[in-house]
Amino acid sequence: MAIWLGLYFIMNIIGVFIMGADKKRAQKHQYRISERTLWLVAFLGGAVGTTAGMQLYRHKTKHTSFKIGFPFLAGIELVLLIKFLL
């Protein structure tokens, strides 16, 4: 169980990190992290982190799919996490 919690924690740290990195790249007009990659990280357990990163860095907040999708996916992941822990 500790391994799964560790992976969940790591994926969320990665989620925050890639949202910040993509925001920085956008500001510098550099090559961006693909939306597919952002969604993949969120889907693989990092939805809470990507949602937090989206709010923290004010990144992708105008895109409806991210604005609604990331928090929705984060909610599902949190429910599954609670169910897993109980």
Image (tube, grey):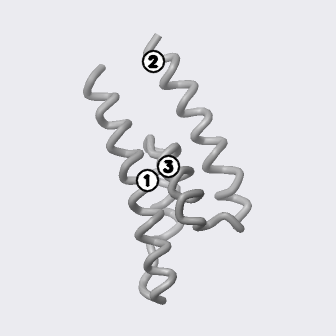
Q: Is residue 14 left or right of residue 68?
A: left
Q: Is residue 48 above or below residue 79?
A: below
The image shows residue 24 at horizontal and vertical percentages of 44, 76
Is the C-beta separation of discs 2 and 1 under 8 Å? no
The image shows residue 81 at horizontal and vertical percentages of 48, 25
Is the C-beta separation of discs 2 and 3 under 8 Å? no
Q: Quadrant of residue 65?
A: bottom right
Q: Is residue 11 above or below residue 33?
A: above
Q: Earlier in the sequence, mark 3 or mark 1?
A: 1
Marks 3/1: CA–CA distance: 7 Å
Q: List the single residue furthest toward the bottom.
A: 29
Residue shown at 62%/35% (left/top)?
75
Amino acid type of the residue that numbered disc 1 sits on in the rendered structure:
Gly
- Image disc number at residue 42: 3
Amino acid type of the residue that numbered disc 3 sits on in the rendered structure:
Ala
Marks 2/1: CA–CA distance: 21 Å
Q: Secondary structure at mark 2?
A: helix
Amino acid type of the residue that numbered disc 2 sits on in the rendered structure:
Phe
Which residue is identified by label 1? 15
Judged by depth in the image, the label closer to the viewer, 3 or 1, is 1
Q: Secondary structure at mark 3?
A: helix
Depth order, front residue of 38/60: 60
Is the C-beta separation of discs 3 and 1 under 8 Å? yes
Residue shown at 66%/50% (left/top)?
69
Q: Quadrant of residue 44?
A: top left
Residue shown at 54%/30% (left/top)?
78
Q: Is residue 48 above or below residue 40?
A: above
Depth order, front residue of 72/61: 61
User: Dot 2, crowdedness within 10 Å: few (<14), some or many (≥20)?
Assistant: few
Which residue is identified by label 2? 84
The image shows residue 80 at horizontal and vertical percentages of 53, 25
The image shows residue 71 at horizontal and vertical percentages of 64, 45
